[in-house]
Each structure stands twice: as C-alpha cells, then as structure tokens.
Amino acid sequence: MQHQHTEPGVVVPGIDAPSTVACLRSLHPRGVRTIVASESAETPASCSTYCDEFVEVPDPDADLMAYGDALLDLARRPDVETLIPVREEDVYILADRKDEFAEVVRTNWPDFETLRLVQDRVELFAAADAADVAVPETALLDQWTDWDRETIVKPRYTVSAPAYLSGDSDAVTIGSTEYQRPGSPPDPQAAREKRGHMPLVQERIPDSREFGFFAMYDHGEPVATFQHCQRRGWKYCGGPSAYRETVYDPELEEAGRALLDELEWHGLAMVEFLRDTDAEEYKLMEINPRFWSSLPFSVQAGADFPYYYWQQARGEPIDVDDSYEVGIGGHLLRGELSYLHSVATEEYPMVERPNFADAAREVVSSIVHQPRFDYAVSDDLMPFFRDGLNLVHALRGTEQDPSSSGDDAAGAVAAGDEATAEQSNPSASQPQGASPSQASQQLDD
C-alpha cells in the first residue's frame, strides 16, 4: 500500500493512558500527520479530532517481537519521520532494534545499553549511587535479611522482555509491587518461579507525596525540564495520579539532573522520587524512559514536551522557556472518582482515612479553581467519552467474572503505559492492608 501524504508524520502507540492523546493535540495543529498504532480500536486516541490515521498492530503483551515488526513496518513508510514511545514496551523495542529504525527514521531515544541501566532497577540504583543520588535501602529478595522492618517487594525490571527474563518472556508476568508484613518473609524461590526473575526488596518510605522530575535530554545535555507533585492518587493512600500540582525545588532539580547526567541520557525521561522526611532528602524510585501518563498536564502548564521531542528528532532548534507557574493543578477525572470511592469504601490500616465530606469538598474546590483535565477538553471531547465507556465495559466484564474485582477492572483501563492492571493498581494483588502508596513507592505515571 502506497502512502502519498505530503505532511511529515509521527507514529504514536495508542494506549489507555492520556499521553497518546496529549501528543496528538500538540503535534496535529502544527501540521504533523498523526498515526495512532494500537492493538485496540477502542483506545481513546483513535477517536480524537487530532488523529489522522489509525493502524492496528499486534498486542506487545502477547507478542513483543511481532509488535516491534509492526512498528518497523510503519517506520518504513515515506511519510513517517519518527516514533514516540509512551510505554515501556515501546522504548524497549525502539532501543533494542535502534540500528534497524535508524535506517528509516530519526531515532530520538537511547541505545539499548543505556536503556538497560534504567529498566533494570539494580543497574539504575548503581548509577544513582555513582551520581550521589539517594535511593531507598534495596536488595535482591534472596539477599534481604531484615524482615522485621516494613518493606515492599517489587519487580527488578520494568518490562517483561527477552533481554531481562529467562524463558518465554511473553508468557511471564513480572508481577506487581507488594507490601510485605513485618515478620513474614516470602519464599525467594517461589517468587522467582512466579515472576520469571528474582525481585527486589526495598524499605518502605511512609510519606506518600510523590514527585516527578521530567526532562528532555540531547546526548547528555538537558533541553527542557519540569516538576510536579502528586497531591491525590487513585486511592486516598496513593497510587496513580488523580490530581497533581506544579512545583519547583532546586534540590529535586539537582537530583534529577545528576542522575540523567550520569547516564549521559538522550530523549525522554521522568525521574520519580519520594520525599524521605526523616532523612530530609528525595529518594529515587525509578525512571520512566518514555512519555508519562500525566503528559497532558505538563503541556497545559507550559512544558510542551511532544513538540520539543518532534523538534529534536528533526534536528530543529528548540526554543524552550523553562519558566512555568508554580502551584497550578490538573486532574484525571476518572482518578478523582476513584479517589472518592476509596475514601468512602476502603480501609488502609497504616493510613488515616479522610472524612468523606472534607475529601469531596477538596476535590470539588480544586476542580473549580484548577479546571485542567487530562482528557476533557472542549474541542476534543470524544477521547473523554471513549475512556469512560472503556471503564464501564471493564466494570461490566468484572461483574461477569467473579474471580476479578472492580478495582482490577478500573486498574486495567487506567494502566495504559503502566503495562498491567496490577502495576497500575498494586493493591489488587497485595496482602490485606497493603496500600498503593505504601507498596509501590512509585508514581505509576
């Protein structure tokens, strides 16, 4: 099939998180032809006003290599100039096969040797140590001995992929993050067999505030940076972002830059931290080496990363104004509803549950005073409705499957670039009493 489009094009994988739609809304008005590639025609981006073309591709969870072949076929089209990674599988494929992609498109992402330092948390924390960036106390599960402390067990890797796992990576689920009760050590061998690798154990940091340092780098040099703090998660104890506000902290900037400088980074990065109030320092959780799910808010706040990415990929000068207003907020409305549902119906023993009336007033007040929304915008409402319909379908499917919970379904719809429902909603597979913020210690963004 010949494609005779004159506009330069970009391929954006279509996922259920809002990051795909944010890319379309940024680039289409600038004359960039937007091509959404997804395993599901029900992805919200497929019905966006700013989507020029939808292409069905294999599901990377079912066949990662076939998915990579499909992306490479798209890259070979004469109207395609680059691809944008929005989930871990995307950037893994793009980096692992970078030489092949480089023959046909502009490759604005790291090579695989550098990516591995990020997707393997053992390697990442070693790089953080070299950069003098603080990390939680962490060890492989079979090397941890202090089980009287509050700890979490989490995957060593951020994606199920052949380079990281033994056996058939398509058949392995690396699992979610789980809170480990003090005095109850897990079985390392059982964990290895279940997850396809030896997971990590990490000290629990009790402060649920989650901070993101966002950056675009050009071969080791920062081009644009941005910061936000998550104020509310999908659960009252944390989880994926429902409401966040812009912040600026020189200490956060210093930590984020030091780590990316150490890695000589190229392309996109979201560096995630928790604030350890006892040590009075930020501690690294992970790096997302692709666009983050709260990307619409970054753009609304003045950091137009999709456009920066496009300009950098094309070798164009990037005119970045790093100044942005601190204290403005943005919402994922579905996340706000989940938060209120959590306040009304759930108990987490280690986190005080807010008063529902106070929580509702807080949500309504922030929506009125900070009316910025990830999906709901006046000139492109269909992704918002499609996202809501996906959630309804998922919940109905759960009602027909007694082995699943409503929270599992909501997590599956939310997961998008978070790979699995368990990763976006860790409480689904945790022991009773575990919480997303206590367990995951990450933004899940």
Image (cartoon, helix red, strand yellow):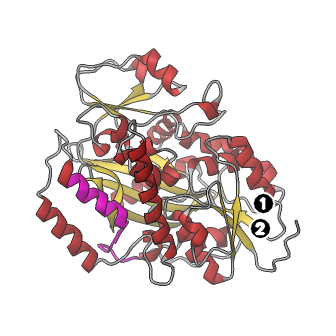
Label 2 crowd bin: few (<14), some (14–19), many (20+), radius 10 Å? many
Name the residue rendered at 42%, 41% in the picture.
Answer: 401
How far across and down, in percent of the image, does residue 98 sit? 74, 49
Name the residue rendered at 52%, 64% in the picture.
Answer: 19
Q: Which residue is mark 1?
A: 75
Q: Is residue 210 visible?
A: yes
Position above or below: 370 against 433: below
Q: Which residue is mark 2?
A: 80
How far across and down, in percent of the image, does residue 388 sit? 43, 65
Quadrant of the image occupied by residue 434? top left
Q: Amino acid at mark 1?
A: Ala
Are circles 2 and 1 on residues that touch, CB within 8 Å? yes
Magenta region, residue range: 324-343
Q: Nearer the viewer, residue 178 or 264?
A: 178
Position above or below: 338 against 259: below
Q: How many marks?
A: 2
Position above or below: 202 against 244: above
Name the residue rendered at 24%, 73% in the picture.
Answer: 366
Name the residue rendered at 77%, 67% in the picture.
Answer: 80
Label at residue 384: none
Residue 163 located left or right of residue 123:
right
